[in-house]
Image: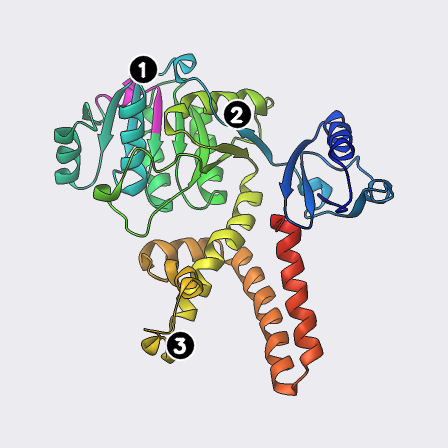
Amino acid sequence: MIAIIKPDATEDQIYELTEWFEGQGLRCDLSRGDYQTIIGLVGDTSGIDPELVEALDIVESVTRITKPEDDQAIRSRAPGDFRRSGIKTVGVVGLGLIGGSYAKAFQDKSEARILGYDLSDSITSFAKLEGTLDDILTKDNIGECDLLIVALYNQAIIDFIKENAPYIKKDALVIDTGGLKRRICSECFPIASEYGFTFIGGHPMAGKKFSGYKYSTGKLFRDSSMIIVPDPKCRDIYTILHKVEDALAPCRFGSITVCSADKHDSMIAFTSEMAHIVSNAYIKSPTAREHNGFSAGSYKDMTRVAWLNEDMWTEIFMENKDNLIFELDTIIGFLEEYKNALETGDSEKMRTILRDGKQAKEELDGI
């Protein structure tokens, strides 16, 4: 839920309103722009009457961005304390950009012993030679890991957990890095329960244009968001959240978001997958071949993620096709509006739909 505050509201009035929201068990995220202040409400907003809040003199409008029953994401600032975690040994499976960056972060910012494995023996041996790894991760020592990070493609994550579950230490914390969570979590939660370790679906919202160990860095995750999906059978979400905060403290995540697998996959279809599809389609215009001398920041922004790993993204798109088709249908419908306005020469319609998009950006980002 978001509340847009009128421009003439005083700081005291805004403070009193946020205090009231927090008294209802919500967290308030303030976004201040030149013309508007927006309060984003995080938590269970089902008990909040939008019309009641909108009746306040300082409130211009109140909008639910999710249904009350879907507004279940829990977010935290994520400083944590790694010493409090009790983790002595960290294992990292897959030493690409993400896995390599995890290994380097723990090596740089903790006293833990770092074990690692990659399908490429040369990468594993180089990471050990470079000092990122203290030793190579094997079936013989995987049981020594208090924290295990599995940084592979989605199917490979499931296969690894199934194959190695008997060797994983009881009470170990296992976190994956897959881009989708429904299938991974549904298959891995029962395995973890059977063998006595804790599996948490994870998705670090960080990356680079280029992949591979040579581009990894211990600073990759700093100030970025980490999404985690705990087993829905878990009764104490906050204990899990604090456990992950401490375990991942060396990575310096800016925040940790807890949500369901369904919520994660529907949101990622919009925030990540759509951006890659639109960018990949946009660059296919024949005009793109003549862009030199005519392009600036907007072109670079639009085309940055057109250069992608087609194998990985095909797997992701196909696994999340229901959510992705919904987002594609939505954007295609809006694009048709722009096209129709142009075809009919309807300047007023064009002005209206452009203003609608501008206002949507203002409401979401507080411009």
Q: Can residue 167 be spotted in the picture?
A: no
Tell me how far mark 1 sits from mark 2, CA to CA: 20 Å
Of discs 3 and 1, which sits in the foreground? 3
**Left or right of residue 226: residue 145:** left
Q: Which residue is drawn at 52% across and 31% down?
A: 230
Sequence-wise, the earlier of marks 3 and 1 is 1
Whether residue 313 is visible: yes
| Distance (Cα) linking label 2 and label 3 | 45 Å
Q: What stretch is highlighted in magenta?
A: 140-148
Residue 122: quadrant of the picture: top left
Report the disc number at residue 359: none
| 24 relative to 28 in the view: left or right | right
Element carrying mark 3: loop
Q: Mark 3 points at which residue?
A: 285
- The circle drawn on residue 241 is 2
Identity, as a three-letter code, of the amino acid under mark 3: Ser
The location of residue 267, given as percent across then percent down, is: 55, 49
Q: In this view, does 297 lie above or below 5?
A: below
Q: Residue 346's quadrant in the figure?
A: bottom right
Camera-side residue of 7 and 89? 7
- Label 1 or label 2, whichever comes before in sequence order: 1
* Left or right of 92 in this view: 29: right
Q: Which residue is drawn at 55% across and 33% down?
A: 258
Give the amino acid at mark 2: Leu
Of callouts 2 and 3, the N-terminal one = 2
| Amino acid at circle 1 | Lys
